[in-house]
Amino acid sequence: MPRSASLLVLALLLVSAPADAKKVWGTKADKGFIDDVMAFGGENDARFAFIVTDAAQLLTIRVVKTDGFATEAEVKVEPATAVPKALAFVGDGSKLALLYQDGGSGQQGGLLYELPSGKLLKKIGPATAATLTSHKGELVVSLVSSKTDAKNAGTHNAQVFRAADFKKLGAGSVTIAPDQTLKQPPLRLLYFEPGHLQLVGMMKGKYDKKRDIRLPERAVRWSLITRKEVWSAEPKDVLVWVKATNMRPNHPGQLRFLQVSDDLKALQTVDADNELGSVTLPIAWKLYEPKSLEQAESWDGKTLWFSMTIDPVNPDAVRRKKADKERVDLYRLDPGPKATPLGGVPTDKRKFRWTVGSARFFAYLRKLKGFGRGGNELEIHEMGR
């Protein structure tokens, strides 16, 4: 190959690879550790919130401005033994919602704080599970209480609260028989969607008298809150539908998700209607460790963020007889197959946790060694451009 052609190929590879993200701020916990739960403000809200705790006597939410990283507020949370589950700026940014799990009972609930005063405004719970999710296009908190009776029938009671003020918007319940069937609606449960506000199942097809046949089963999405059918359709391809729904137990709490194929050679997407799709990456899949996939979904289910980590001994590195540096590449996946690179960060061979904010920043937490929860180094990175 002529030298000019070789340089052109190299240039194209360099352009297509995710650019290194630029670190613009960092901090370490002066006491305890920095928790995994973090949150950025909305599109026009230049703030970031993170939690410092020791899981015993200290649990503080710190809010900083991302246009200089000065501290705007510190919110003291009690009890300090609570385990944070989710955090969000709500009410046009004037409030902060924290979902937590009780360190003793395991029950979950929500706390609503005023900013910047840190005053506790309202508390909801306890429940089996608390989730930030979507209801009628609005950010809400779902509280679900579940119990099983002596005959192994499970009852799920769901309540939905507006995240902005914790006002109750509705409630509903459903009972699932041991064989995963429901009396109302009459269907076989496949799975619950985020927050247990809706479920998806299979309903027997109607009987067609003219043709003297029973029509195929229909997939049904049903709302516990409105007690109405939201959507129904016959699966376009039953084999694809079954394959997609069989993946869902690995991704609870997500409408859309990513999963590496069984042969570890490709990245697949599954949408809210269980349609399978593919993902186009800007660099060769073979460079990544297939089992390194990490992902998160926006509360409205419209955006997926995910990361893949470079395998230091990928095939190209083996051929060069020189290991690559381990780096995590972060991506955004909007509807469609093309993944948008947000930037890469050297891992220093440590586990990590990330959170994506606006179109400009993401947070990167370097995890503690030998401890599953939290980290001791938090960084804000500007996305590669």
Image (cartoon, helix red, strand yellow):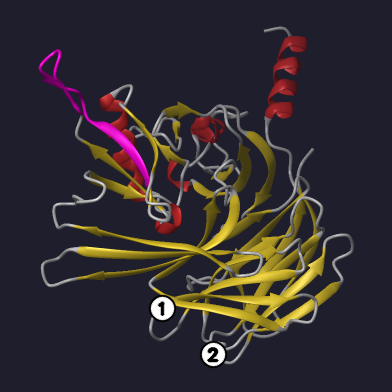
The foreground one among 35 and 135 is: 135
Residue 118 marker: none
Q: Amino acid at mark 2?
A: Ala
Give residue 274's quadrant in the image. Answer: top left
Residue 382 rendering spot, x and y as whole percentages: 78, 50
**Which residue lies most toward the bottom here?**
57
The foreground one among 212 and 192 is: 212
How many labels were placed on the picture? 2
Give residue 164's quadrant in the image. Answer: bottom right
Q: Earlier in the sequence, mark 2 or mark 1?
A: 2
Answer with left or right where residue 294 lies relative to residue 376: left
Which quadrant, please, contains the N terminus? top right
The foreground one among 246 and 292 is: 246
Residue 248 rendering spot, x and y as whole percentages: 35, 45
Residue 67 rendering spot, x and y as whole percentages: 88, 60
Q: Amino acid at mark 1?
A: Gln
Q: Residues within 10 Å of mark 1 (few under 14, many from 20)?
A: some
Residue at x 22% of width, y 30% of height:
217
- Element under disc 2: loop
Give residue 98's quadrant in the image. Answer: bottom right
- Element under disc 1: loop
Q: Which residue is mark 1?
A: 107
The foreground one among 323 and 336 is: 336
Which quadrant, please, contains the C terminus? top right
Residue at x 73% of width, y 44% of height:
20
Q: Which residues are magenta?
A: 206-222
Q: Which residue is mark 2?
A: 56
Q: In the displayed structure, would residue 57 be above or below residue 120?
A: below
Residue 227 rendering spot, x and y as whole percentages: 37, 51
